[in-house]
Image (tube, rainbow, N blue to C red):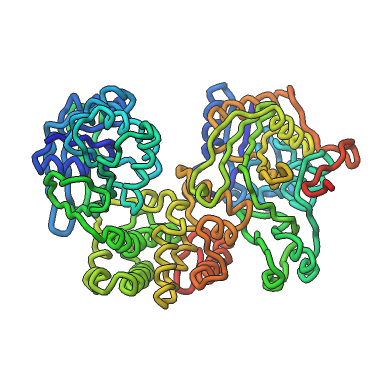
Amino acid sequence: MKLCFMTARRDPPVPSQIVLDASEILSRRGHQVRSEIAEETLTQIDSLKTDGSLYLLKSYTELSLSLAGVLHAQGARVLNPYPSCVACRNKIISLQYLRAGGIPVPRSWITADMSLLIPLVKKMPLIVKPWMGWRGIGIKVVRTPEEVKALPVPEAPLIVQEFLEGTGEDLRLYVAGEKVFATRKPFSASSFSIPGRSCTVTPAERELALRCGRAFGLGLYGLDLIETPTGASVVDVNYFPGYKGTPNAAEAVADYIENYAAGKVSLELPAPGSASLPSLAAGDAG
Amino acid sequence: MKTVIIGAGKIGCGLAGQLLHDSGHEVVFVARSQDFTEHLNRVGRYFVRLVGQGGIREMLVDGVRAVAACETEFVAEEIADADLVITSVGFDNLQLIARLIAEGIKRRTAPVNVLAFENSGSAGPSLRSFVAKYLPVDFPLDRHGFAGVLISRAVTQRLGDIAANAPLVFVGDPYSRIIVDSAGLRGPLPHVEGMIVADNYDAWVQKKFCMFSAAHATTAYLGHLKGYKYVHTAIRDPQIRAAVLTVIKEGQQGLAARYGAELAGDESDCREILERIGNAYLCDPISRVGREPCRKLKSEDRLVGTARLAEAAGVEPRGLGLAIAAAMFYTNQKDPSAFELQHQVLIMGGEETLRQFSGLDNTSKSGRLANESLYRLTDGWRRGGVITNLDKMVWA
């Protein structure tokens, strides 16, 4: 089978380790594997011909996402599926998919008028995020009306969420199909320099992770949870992460890609209103 | 005289082993790697190559042997009759070796000093508390000394193949001075070349951190932004050199205000630091100097700690603010700390990450300057990959 990783420019300019490792495994299994960076390729999209490859969207850039959209529109197979990637990439929309999937999330708002946040910030710290973030650019935590007033006029849509001050551990879950990996990091002023450590996944964590995947129709993805006094909350979901700190992830990723390419597994973004579980936003209780 | 050195890395071999050997000690290493242990026992020697403006000097360190760290009993036996114990494992790994030291100390009749070559003000007391956890409550641990040691030498490379029979070569600069915290010692130390026992150890630690270490890290992080690979090439960039000199002077002024002008030094100290960083023989990569950015951004560490010290002296730490911001952009796929840093930035943004890592925020001048630089850098960084003009913030 032909496989094409859609990757992003990196500094230094070497592919991500998970792509390297998974590519090697898939090549050994006889698949034709290549990588392309949309920003470094001239692609004529009005007459784009696909060659039956399965396209593996690793990059988060807008150009790569758009190219994935073109491929999707042409009927090419993209993993994760383009609609699922768009849904989780857009932080505003992703929140609704998470809530519809019964995933605990922070309380969230949207507006373009930052002054409307002032009554809110008097009750709780807020985190302001661009709707399609990249590397944390534009994310700001505000705790006082003065900090809200100092926020720049938004250049792009923002999502505003209750900022959850972690009190327990930061938990990162990485998923490849049915395989779930976890890394934990203690949350304290002195622990920030300590990298997360790989750890066992509890049944509850596994169930939550797989539910996130079903909420978006994702097969290769990661999610970040923060433990708070009122319970854990999902603060971020991203497609095709780096699986950093998780041994054996490359094998699981390669297996999933192979099964998806062979049609043994499929993914689909849930239809609107199809979720039946109640929403469980952190702070909703009481 | 026998010295046990726990940690057979660049500093363990390239500095501690060489100094102790040249002082007439029998040197026994405790090595994490079984392969390295076997190499050292098979070859029995290595070279230390000191490189700098004065030329190249190569010294043979022979008659050495090693014990694997996993062989707890053997390690304990070596520590039991050592005249001196040294650690060189990195501060974050001291907890991992504490049990080895405790087992050895249990078997001793005579007291011993344990010197932590960890470049940290708190390494001695911290190591003592870690070791105490493995000893009975009423064990007379106070008989033994645990002292931090400040080292000057940069050892940047280990050359050679541990599978071969040729001796390895450790490459470093020619600085041999080591400063020992007198407060942690119990009884006299055996003679060691280059050793100074200091009552004002904290002041010396601050001097090193606030001037050399701050400058070194600044060179690495600004160099990374400009696409350099080595610190000796980065420091030759006029803009980086000017920025690093600013950082050195801000630190020097902070030191002078707290510890006095004599400790802080003068222009010659500043020049010496720039020369050391510019030592091309060391071939010191930015990936080594800039490693573990999360640790280097801690409140008491070289960048933020120095900024606070300068600010307390009435100095506006503009250079340090830029250095702190530059550190926030450090990426290295092979560095777990850099990954952690970038992941936190992804989740909560640069400003909040800096606040949580270092305690800096807009309530302090240092925090405002760091955040100001953070925004200026972010604004250009989103449009390009490498900065070509640091003063005008032009990106390519």
Q: Where is residue A5 shown, x and y percent of the image?
A: 61, 38
Q: Is residue A139 left or right of residue B124?
A: right
Q: Where is residue A181 shown, x and y percent of the image?
A: 61, 31
Q: Residue at x 69, y 68 (%)?
A: A144
Give the number of marks: 0
* Up-down relation of residue B330 to residue A234 (above or below): below
Residue A277 quadrant: top right
In this rendering, does residue B55 appear at all?
Answer: yes
Q: Is residue B100 left or right of residue A105?
A: left
Q: Is residue A269 left or right of residue B244?
A: right
Q: Nearer the viewer, residue A48 or B303?
A: B303
* Up-down relation of residue A249 to residue B350 (above or below): above
Q: Nearer the viewer, residue B297 or A41?
A: B297
Q: Residue furthest bottom?
A: B314
Q: Nearer the viewer, residue A126 or B391?
A: A126
Q: Residue at x 19, y 54 (%)?
A: B197
Residue A260 quadrant: top right
Q: Where is residue B321 shown, x and y percent of the image?
A: 47, 68
Q: Residue furthest front?
A: B138
Q: Residue furthest left?
A: B24
Q: Please identify the quadrant where the N terminus of chain B is shown.
A: top left
* Up-down relation of residue B91 to residue B392 (above or below): above
Q: Where is residue A61 shown, x and y percent of the image?
A: 64, 51
Q: Residue at x 74, y 49 (%)?
A: A46
Q: Residue at x 68, y 64 (%)?
A: A143
Q: Is residue B303 left or right of residue B21?
A: right
In this rendering, does residue B238 appear at all?
Answer: no
* Up-down relation of residue B8 to residue B372 (above or below): above
